[in-house]
């Protein structure tokens, strides 16, 4: 999610930190119904695909299919579990604003919901992507610390001119990450769990590569914002993801200055390969990058 096209001033009605009231009472029946449709579809699909912390989080927050959740109710649970809260924002917010919220354990979530004819794809994060996709993982203490560390890292990356590298870390973990478990690969990325098609593609399709997560490798890897990922990175555990994020990124950014990007969809010599993808899906779309 590239915040660069957002203006730097909050729209009228929003606070200086870009937050707005969720206005839960003003959602229409049709809007609640869109949530219910998406919720039922995804929970059925994710039972043996999403990781345990995600599924436990859904339960703990009592996110249900009765309609768009009220952030006040979510926060009553979430604050007690990990000190996080959800705040409503009009849409994408500037990078610095986004990071400031995360560093302070506030997750900015869109209040609007996609329409019935956009069930499968939309460009800006809506309340289903943000709340169903992101918030369950924030009930996990280790992941909760990772997200706050990412927010602090974002503020540093901005000041050091390395936002692009750090944004790749977010993309390949928070949005599109997979995790190794005793039961096999499981999803924790919010961009996947909120997408019906990618929830299947990322685990079952022979096309994408599935590679061991490595911080520097991930920061060298561009991503697709408009289609399934050609490569997914697999973390061994949330603890190891958190540990990687708690290093000093200063020397890593310095090292990255002299390292080329690894073209999207390529496997590098040092990669730990869990599954070498055929890449048939992306090759057949024949849009060279
Ligand atoms: N704003 N609301 C919102 N949601 C995001 O995920 C988001 C954002 N602004 C900036 C941003 N993401 C990204 O540019 C950073 O993660 C790099
Ligand atoms: Fe997201």
Image (cartoon, grey):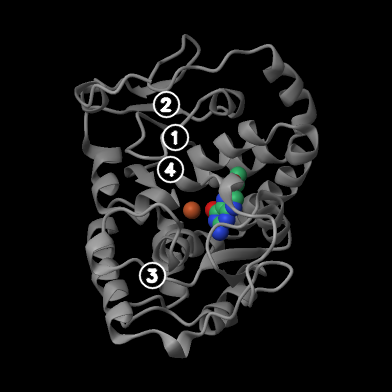
Residues at discs 1 and 2 in contact (Cβ within 8 Å) = yes
Residue placed under numbered mark 4 in the picture: 176
Residue placed under numbered mark 2 in the picture: 211
Is 211 drawn above or below residue 192 in the view shown?
A: above
Q: Earlier in the sequence, mark 4 or mark 2?
A: 4
Q: Which label belongs to residue 113?
A: 3
Q: Earlier in the sequence, mark 3 or mark 4?
A: 3
Whether residue 27 sits left or right of residue 238 in the image: it is left
Q: Which label belongs to residue 234?
A: 1
Q: Secondary structure at mark 2?
A: strand
Pointer 1 local density, CA inside 10 Å: few below 14, some 14–19, many at least 20:
many
Q: Mark 4 or 2, which is nearer the eye?
A: 4
Pointer 3 local density, CA inside 10 Å: few below 14, some 14–19, many at least 20:
some
Q: Earlier in the sequence, mark 3 or mark 1?
A: 3
Q: Residue at x 63, y 44 (%)?
A: 242
Q: Residue at x 39, y 84 (%)?
A: 27
Q: Earlier in the sequence, mark 2 or mark 3?
A: 3
Q: Secondary structure at mark 1?
A: strand
Q: Quick one: quadrant of the C terminus? A: top left
Q: What distance separates the C-alpha of mark 3 from that of mark 4?
A: 21 Å
Q: Observer-nearest residue: 231 or 213?
A: 231
């Amino acid at each position: 999610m590239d915040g660069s096209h957002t203006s730097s001033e909050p729209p009228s009605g929003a606070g200086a930190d870009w937050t707005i009231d969720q206005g839960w009472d003003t959602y229409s029946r049709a809007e609640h119904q869109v949530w219910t449709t998406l919720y039922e579809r995804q929970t059925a699909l994710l039972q043996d695909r999403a990781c345990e912390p995600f599924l436990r989080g859904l339960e703990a927050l009592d996110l249900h299919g009765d309609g768009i959740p009220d952030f006040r109710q979510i926060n009553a649970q979430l604050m007690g579990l990990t000190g996080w809260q959800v705040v409503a924002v009009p849409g994408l917010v500037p990078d610095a604003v986004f990071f400031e919220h995360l560093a302070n354990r506030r997750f900015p979530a869109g209040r609007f919901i996609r329409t019935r004819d956009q069930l499968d794809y939309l460009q800006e994060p809506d309340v289903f992507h943000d709340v169903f996709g992101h918030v369950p993982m924030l009930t996990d203490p280790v992941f909760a610390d990772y997200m706050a560390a990412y927010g602090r890292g974002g503020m540093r990356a901005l000041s050091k001119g390395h936002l692009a590298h750090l944004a790749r870390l977010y993309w390949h973990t928070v949005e599109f990450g997979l995790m190794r478990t005793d039961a096999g690969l499981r999803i924790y990325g919010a961009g996947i769990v909120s997408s019906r098609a990618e929830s299947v593609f990322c685990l079952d399709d022979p096309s994408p590569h599935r590679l061991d997560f490595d911080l520097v490798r991930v920061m060298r890897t561009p991503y697709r914002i408009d289609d399934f990922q050609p490569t997914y990175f697999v973390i061994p555990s949330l603890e190891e993801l958190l540990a990687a994020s708690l290093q000093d990124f200063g020397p890593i950014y310095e090292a990255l200055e002299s390292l080329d990007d690894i073209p999207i969809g390529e496997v590098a010599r040092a990669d730990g390969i869990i599954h070498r993808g055929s890449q048939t899906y992306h090759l057949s779309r024949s849009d060279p990058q």
